[in-house]
Amino acid sequence: MTDIPDCPECASTFTYVDGELFICPECSHEWALTVKSDNEMELTVSDAHGNQLAVGDTVTVIKDLKVKGSSSVVKVGTRVKNIRLVEGDHDIDCKIPGIGPMKLKSQFVKKS
């Protein structure tokens, strides 16, 4: 039997695994618990000026970006809080105020 952690929100011991998530049936909290192996490389992402980005950082957009499939534009100077780093061409996953969830390329942002 694997060792399943208690819920970090309500400390319930009735948590269970569903795919890659742990779920608490009492408070409905879901969270991922990933374990890195020794040979797994850590994701490194740099902004337009070469500064290292980390999960939870705040970044500022340095160029007007058109939103695909919409007439909206992300303006220069827009601050984006609490970013997540993902693999791929668009390596920042975030929620932009007034627009919603988006993926950005790190070459168009600078660390705030």
Image: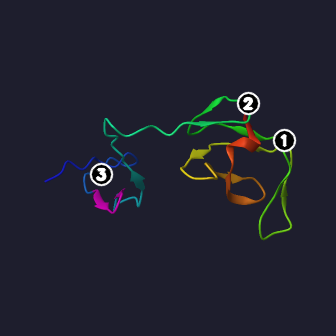
Question: Which element type, helix, strand or loop, lies under badge 3?
Answer: loop
71 within the magenta span: no
Q: Which residue is mark 1?
A: 77
Question: Where the N terminus falls, by quadrant?
Answer: bottom left
Mark pair 2, 1: CA separation: 15 Å
Local crowd size for mark 1, using a 10 Å CA cut-off: few (<14), some (14–19), many (≥20): some
Residue numbers of the magenta segment: 15-22
Label located before the other in sequence (2 or 1): 2
C-alpha span from label 3 to label 1: 43 Å
Upstream in sequence: badge 2 or badge 3: 3
Q: Secondary structure at mark 2?
A: loop
Q: Residues within 10 Å of mark 3 (few under 14, many from 20)?
A: some
Left or right side of 64 for 96: left
Please say whether residue 80 is visible from this viewpoint.
no
Q: Is residue 96 left or right of residue 32?
A: right
Secondary structure mostly seen in magenta is strand
Q: Nearer the viewer, mark 2 or mark 3?
A: 2
**Element at badge 1?**
loop
For the residues labelled 2 and 3, say whether their Cβ atoms are less than 8 Å apart.
no
Kindly identify which residue carries mark 2: 49
**Residue 36 lies in what quarter of the image?**
top left
Would residue 20 be counted in the magenta stretch?
yes
Q: Disc 2 to disc 3, how far (Cα)? A: 44 Å
Q: Position of residue 23 (x, y in %)?
A: 35, 59
Location of residue 31 in the rendering, given as x and y in whole percent from the top left corner = 41, 52
For disc 3, the marked residue is 12
